[in-house]
Image: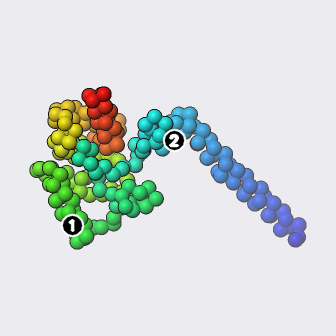
Amino acid sequence: MNAEFRSAIRPALVMLVLFTILTGLAYPALILGIGQLVFPVQANGSLVRDGGKVVGSELIGQSFAAPKYFHGRPSAAGKGYDGQASSGSNLGPTSKALIDRVRTDVKAARADGLTGDVPGDLLTTSASGLDPHISPASARVQIARVAKARGMTEPQVQAIVEGVVEAPLAGILGEPRVNVLLLNRQLDAQGAKTTG
């Protein structure tokens, strides 16, 4: 190896090692530390715990099928809300498969007791297939079913729904929404108070 080649390769190797340490170790460690200090709940996945047991995340939807629970959006992620298979269905508005699935979902909603217009987010999947939120309108159309299944009055359930509606970020970004997991946990807690 001649001296000219060694003098050219040495700075390149030094820069490679330096930037590997800076961008591969120091920067991620700094961001992790800041996240843990400033936003510890979010940095750890916004986990929802029941005692010491993790029951879900505020960021990932779950399937609720029992009549006493509010139901979320349909999911195209694997067999439903599978974080390892996150994706949309990629079906376009003219897709026969999508039209058939939506018709089936409308029939299921009618069988569930929903009357009138069924909000679109109860019939369509999100881009990730993991959306934990529904619109307030989607929560409101389910109140009668949930109240009946829980032996509660509709105004009682309505009050719980209205209490968990999340406003748009800074009042302008996004739409009002309801986290289905947090709503159902609130209902379970309310039921425990009235029966216990």
What residue is pinned by disc 1? 99
Report the amino acid beneath label 2: Ala
What residue is pinned by disc 2? 43
Residue 106 % position (x, y) = 18, 58
Report the amino acid beneath label 1: Ile
Give the residue at x 33% y 52%: 63
Question: Relative to residue 184, is residue 138 drawn left or right?
Answer: left
Labels in figure, total: 2
Instruction: Of the two numbered discs 1 and 2 on the same chain, state the one appearing first in sequence.
Output: 2
Residue nearer the viewer, 190 or 129: 190
Question: Relative to residue 133, is residue 10 drawn left or right?
Answer: right
Q: Quadrant of residue 171?
A: top left
Residue nearer the viewer, 110 or 45: 110
Give the residue at x 20% y 63%: 104
Residue 62 % position (x, y) = 36, 50
Label 1: element kind: helix
Asked if one can make out residue 90 in the rendered structure from this viewpoint, the answer is yes
Residue 33 % position (x, y) = 60, 38
CA distance for labels 1 and 2: 39 Å
Give the residue at x 33% y 64%: 89
Q: Quadrant of residue 81?
A: bottom left
Q: Few, some or many C-alpha atoms within 10 Å of disc 1 (few <14, some 14-19, many ≥20)?
A: some
Question: Relative to residue 83, is residue 104 drawn left or right?
Answer: left
Asked if one can make out residue 164 in the rendered structure from this viewpoint, the answer is no
Residue 6 % position (x, y) = 85, 65
Picture layout, residue 110 above or below residue 153: below
- How is the model colour-coded? rainbow
Give the residue at x 14% y 54%: 110
Residue nearer the viewer, 170 or 45: 45
